[in-house]
Image (cartoon, helix red, strand yellow):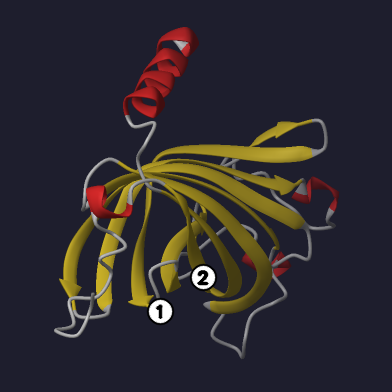
Amino acid sequence: MKTTLLSLILLIISAHANAQVDLSCRLLTVSASPFEGTNKNLELAYIGASNVFAIEPGAVLGAELFTDERTSFQFALAGYNDKAGKPAGFASLFLKYKIAKKYKHSLTIGIGPSLFMRQSWATIKGYTDDELYIENAGNQYKLAWLSGEISYNYYLSKKADVYISLLRTAPKSFGIAAGAVFQLGGKKSRYGRRKGCDCPSYR
């Protein structure tokens, strides 16, 4: 199974060797956890008394391979400080599709699997194992086969966009991330993301 998956990924990359590749860097800021949880009492970074919004600072690095003007594959790796003050992060592989574009604005959705990771909460006094994560070597992991994000891009130039996204940062949390995306290479005229502005004056 692993060999087949690796072969498929290599086939996609080789088939689009001249395709456009973008690199992105986003900062994680505020997260939302609207769902009830067994260990909510251990999550101390909430804003106010609502126990929904929290500060979880971190960063997301991404690489995106375009297969046509609207479709791409994105790999992202994130690290942040979670609501219990522990190091956490995730790795994701999304199939993304641009659903709307108007002048300098575009909206994209992405779906795919994510692997969520955090330093084990089992060392925190009062922790109850809710069997959401798998424990291994002092860390906890959760594989979600269906995860995703919604992202908004604002065109700056032929090489850069402003990038704001709402994405899943943990099994029961969503976060807001903002940053920039830069074109690394590829044929600008082939897949068209760098035709990033539909403005009449764009050349």
Q: Is residue 196 above or below residue 130?
A: below
Residue 175 visible in the snapshot: no
Left or right: 13, with 118 as reference point? left
Amino acid under label 2? Ala
Near-viewer residue (55 or 128): 55
Labels 2 and 1 touching (C-beta < 8 A): yes
What's the residue at 59%, 55% (across, down)? Answer: 61
- Which disc, if any, is residue 156? 1
**Mark 2 packing: few (<14 Cα in 10 Å), some, or many (20+)?**
some
Q: Is residue 26 above or below residue 140?
A: below
Residue 181 visible in the snapshot: yes
Amino acid under label 1? Leu
Near-viewer residue (37 or 66): 66
Label 2: element kind:
strand
What's the residue at 70%, 48% (across, down)? Answer: 118
In the picture of the structure, the residue carrying the numbered disc 2 is 180
- Which disc, if any, is residue 67? none
